[in-house]
Image (cartoon, grey):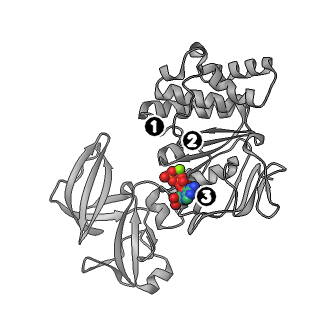
Amino acid sequence: MAYIQLNQVTKRFGNVSAVDKLDLQIEKGECVAMLGPSGCGKTTTLRMVAGFEDLDDGDIRVGERLLSSKREKFYLPPEQRNFGMVFQAFAVWPHMSVFENVAFPLRIRKLPAAEIASRTEEALKHTNLLAVASGSPDDLSGGGKQRVALARALAIRPDVMLLDEPLSSLDPHFREEMRFEIKDLQRRFGFSILYVTHDQSEAMALSDRILVMRAGVVQQIGTPIGVYANPSNRFVFEFIGLSCFLPAGLTPSGMQIAGATLPWPGNVEPPAALMLAGRGLLAARPTEIDFVSEGGVRCEVVNKSYLGETIDYRVQVGKTELRVQKTRRVPGPSIGDHLGLNFTRPHWYPVDEPA
Ligand SMILES: Nc1ncnc2c1ncn2[C@@H]1O[C@H](COP(=O)(O)OP(=O)(O)OP(=O)(O)O)[C@@H](O)[C@H]1O
Ligand SMILES: [Mg+2]
């Protein structure tokens, strides 16, 4: 049985369906990242798991323990859930020392003084804060303050860490460093993580599985590579990774793009339902398009910029501009060149599927 279980979890604010019938299972020691645009229900989900928000439907369990249930009218208060939480804002108390910030939740729980001291020290040690324990968190950098918040969450020896964009206010260098530290702490202490982020590379790097949400509704749950390689719909395709789209008329003899009928280039096979509809949207990653001199979908190179190792081409196909990315180590076309495109791993979506 899964460790954390969300069953049909639903939350409404007036007319807004913030979270709709969410089913999610998280294993012990697993890290699941929640991704989605602003307002899609990520924080609301986390707050329901933490116990700061009640449910309009469904239930939440950890192991055998019921945490929240609409039907049974049951809510375990947050302080009895044994969850560590870290939020985006630096939620540290400037009038308390770093040590006291970390010890505070343990004092609330009325643990014996010796236990508070040893747990606080352990948490400070693992977050590299022992040297600054007696100082004020105000003297620390943003990364340092977030480390205090992390230590405080760690000190309660949580079953689950709930992290709501904990790194988004840090500069990129610190962000990457803290990612490793969080992963390291998870390995050492074995807690599960529910991690909310806007940043897909963060989600990919940290998590065992990612969950993509849109307007309160789960679009896909899977391994990072699985979701990237096999998106369940156009929204997920566009949300995870770079993407470009090319509308096409579909006939047995070929694709109609920009007024011209192109014989089916190799490897491009739309599903039967789209063939029947006669229209489709070809979706591609910029790295999964090759330039070919003969055949392919004809295009003109309209721009070319260097992004370090890769070259980012903008190519025009009829009225549509596409992106193609190639390594700079292989000679490529120049601006103004006319040539063909071969889609090495195309995906197809209905033209009217919402973006
Ligand atoms: N206390 C509240 N009262 C009314 N509406 C709310 C409340 N909390 C959240 N909402 C609404 O619920 C929806 C989901 O909000 P939520 O904060 O969960 O989104 P989010 O995915 O965390 O967004 P962001 O990425 O911007 O943090 C939004 O439409 C939001 O306006
Ligand atoms: Mg949020």
Viewer-nearest of discs 1 and 3: 1
- Residue 207 image position (x, y, % from top left): 59, 45
Element at badge 2? Answer: helix
For image coordinates 40% across by 66% down, the residue present is 283
Picture quadrant of residue 352:
bottom left
Q: Which mark is residue 318?
A: none
Which residue is tagged 3? Answer: 221
Circles 1 and 3 in contact, beta carbons < 8 Å: no
For image coordinates 60% across by 33% down, the residue present is 182
Element at badge 1? Answer: loop
In the image: residue 114, left or right of residue 325: right
Which residue is tagged 2? Answer: 206
Q: Amino acid at mark 2?
A: Leu
Counting other residues with Cα less than 10 Å from the Cα at mark 3, is it few (<14), some (14-19), or many (20 or more)? some
- Residue 54 image position (x, y, % from top left): 70, 56
Alpha carbon distance from label 1 to label 2: 17 Å
Q: Amino acid at mark 1?
A: Ser
Which residue is tagged 1? Answer: 169
Q: Is mark 3 within 8 Å of ligand 1?
A: no
For image coordinates 80% across by 26% down, the residue present is 111
Q: How many labels sit on residues?
A: 3
Alpha carbon distance from label 3 to label 2: 15 Å
Say which of 63 and 289 sits in front.
63
Dot placed on the residue nearer the N-terminal end, 3 or 2: 2
Element at badge 3? Answer: strand
- Residue 277 image position (x, y, % from top left): 44, 85
